Image (tube, rainbow, N blue to C red):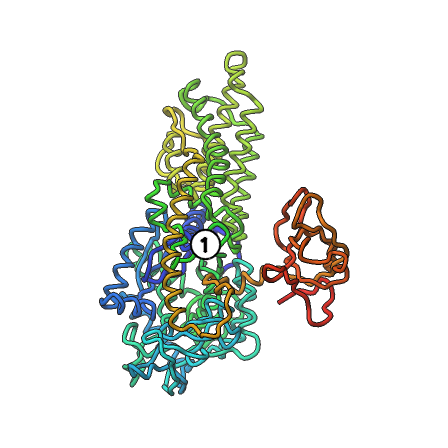
Amino acid sequence: MSRDDYPTDQPAVVTCGLPYANGDLHIGHLRTYVSGDVLARSLRTLGQRTAFVSGSDMHGTPVAVNAEREGVTPEEFALEWHEKYEATFPEFGVEFDNYGHTHDETNAELTREFVREWIEGDHVYEKEIQVAWDPEVDQPLPDRFVEGTCPYCGAKARGDECDEGCQRHLEPGEIENPTSTITGNPAEYRSREHEFLRLSDFQEYLKGFLGRLEGTDNARNQPREWIEGELQDLCITRDMDWGIDYPGEGKEDLVLYVWVDAPIEYVSSTKQYSERVGSDEFDWEAAWREGAPGPGEPMDETPADAGEIVHIIGRDIIQHHTVFWPAMLRAAGYNEPRAVMASGFVNLRGKAFSTSRNRAIWADDYLEEGFEPDLLRYYLVTTGGFQQDIDFSWGRFQERVNGELVGNFGNFVYRSLLFAYRNFEGTPEADPSEEVLEEIDQAMEAFRAGLNDYSLREASQAGIVLSRFGNEYIQRHEPWKLVEEEPERAARVIRDCVQLAKAAAVLLSPVLPNSCERLWEQLGEEGSVHDAPLAACLEDPSGAFGEPEALFEKIEDDRVEELDEKLEERVQAASAAADDTAESEQEESEDEDAPEGLEPLSDERIGFEEFQELDVRIGEVLTAEGIDDADELARLEVDLGVETRQIVAGIKRLHDLDALPGTRVVILANLEPATLFGVESNGMLLAAGEDADLLTTLGDSEPGTKVR
């Protein structure tokens, strides 16, 4: 693959992580799919030949578990959700060139071809391992039929992944204290023979691959810890009936692990797209196979003529896409990814989504509220960096829509086109100014640079920055005053504004496809804005056009209050039901000597990466004094090693403030500053219980020492 900037001469494939066909989509899921769509559209705007593909993940234990609960076959269950996803994605402007699923014959056959290549290359071996077993029903427990404790971090984990702790992939037999999800009884381990892909064969290759990989920092750096030292081989078979049969002889009772056939769907879906449109339109082999060394040949650098493959995923599956998947591709003689973009999570009003407590904005809910999908697309793509967690609330949503789309972009194009229509019946006959052409050229370069840096936010902001300039430009020149006195100057100013509006439509069309298509029509331009190349930003606008309509509507405060009330009612109802269930379960298992008065442990969990984002430090109290007129609050000066912080804490009545200087305490250092009783607090003092028992250290940790 080339390391040239986009666009390149090689075909590009943009993929999104496959959704498990076992439940509704919420806006947290949509972040990666919308981003994939924006990237694919943006690359095409640059002139890059691009296929945007994905599919539903039909196999794996979650599907089998839920199908059994509903009394249907796994295929029936998964196909129903697959069809729901196929219908939902276009509702949000996510238009895949091909959206398949892992159970179709194309993927089944291609998966078997991959595995045969691994076997022929001597990368697969048989090994006897310990498999969790439910003795009550006398059957093995693959993956999510077993839960227990992660052997690495001690968190609650499912059979194949520590999803609530360190997020490591877990091999069969690793999970501690296994419990059957079928009966709820303790499971036991029994010996079974399974097939393994020898990842250790590719350890040196993977080190080189990570050095070449582009994309987000977390996707490029996080996997390094997994490939240092001894690289653990991957068990590629499972004791299940639901899945793709293992193609080796004498193993008819085994199916392939879901993380074998799932990523191969990326290739299968591209192949299906080529078969539908023809290889002249898009050649799947040119993207995935051309230029790749054979399975047994060394690969020390990127082939010059390989395709540009970009995976857009959630950060919880980085290991699968940067360790397992490139090794699988290399072992079968396929091209490696050029880039992996791993997103952060979407939280709701500062807390993680909770499907059990219905604290989520579901895709269907958003559509039923009547909001234009472009508004959500814009929020998801432009709020924060792609690898950062972002927070959704209806209030923040309102601010972004009203401020940037209604007040900036929408306001500029409407007032410009309306003035042009009323005074010139379209684009005035005048030459554009050098100032405006230079501004557009800079915006086009910002768009290119953002894409080549894998920053969809920066690329999308290019059009917003341009419309912000347009608002300032029209306000500075006041064409409404020039129409009578200096009509030629007025014509040139409005000509400039129409040019800016056209350029903004091209630049923002990937993130606001419906709105920019309407703007394109209002400008009287031919064809679709989605077929317009980046160079169209500087092409002359069309001549006459009609009276424009506003692109966006302001979201009123009472609408936000209504939405918040609906959400709160729904969350409370679901939480009450969940609490009733938890209380019932607790009563059944409660120990008579259990301590009273303690709050139950929270059902809400955060990921290990979220914990790592907390900057918790040891500090030494230098001074402590009460705040006038505040009954509870005290002002502390705390030495954090690298600097001294002022912190406000509610300990005035609970501690002898004169005795605190010299005390080593624990501080949350990266909390947003807050002002309490007119005093700024720059951090949080950690304490336990109603008596504010200060957290201190057993030893003599120095101020500034980080708590891990």
Report the residue marked by disc 1. 9
Q: Residue 209 in the image: state x and y as whole percent.
A: 52, 68
SS type, badge 1 = loop
Q: Is residue 89 left or right of residue 644?
A: left
In the displayed structure image, the side of residue 29 where residue 338 appears, left or right? right
Residue 181 visible in rendering: yes
The answer to which of 1 and 465 lies nearer the viewer is 465
- Residue shown at 35% from the left, 78% from the top: 141
Of the pair 592 and 610, the residue shown nearer to us: 592
Query: Mark 1: few, some, or many residues within 10 Å (few <14, many ≥20)?
Result: some
User: Picture coordinates of residue 330 (x, y %)?
Assistant: 45, 71
The quadrant in which residue 237 appears is: bottom left
Residue at 44%, 28% in the rendered image:
414
Residue plotted at (64% across, 48% down): 673
Q: Is residue 531 visible?
A: no
Tell me where residue 531 appears, x and y as whole percent: 38, 42
Q: Is residue 525 left or right of residue 226?
A: left
Amino acid type, label 1:
Asp
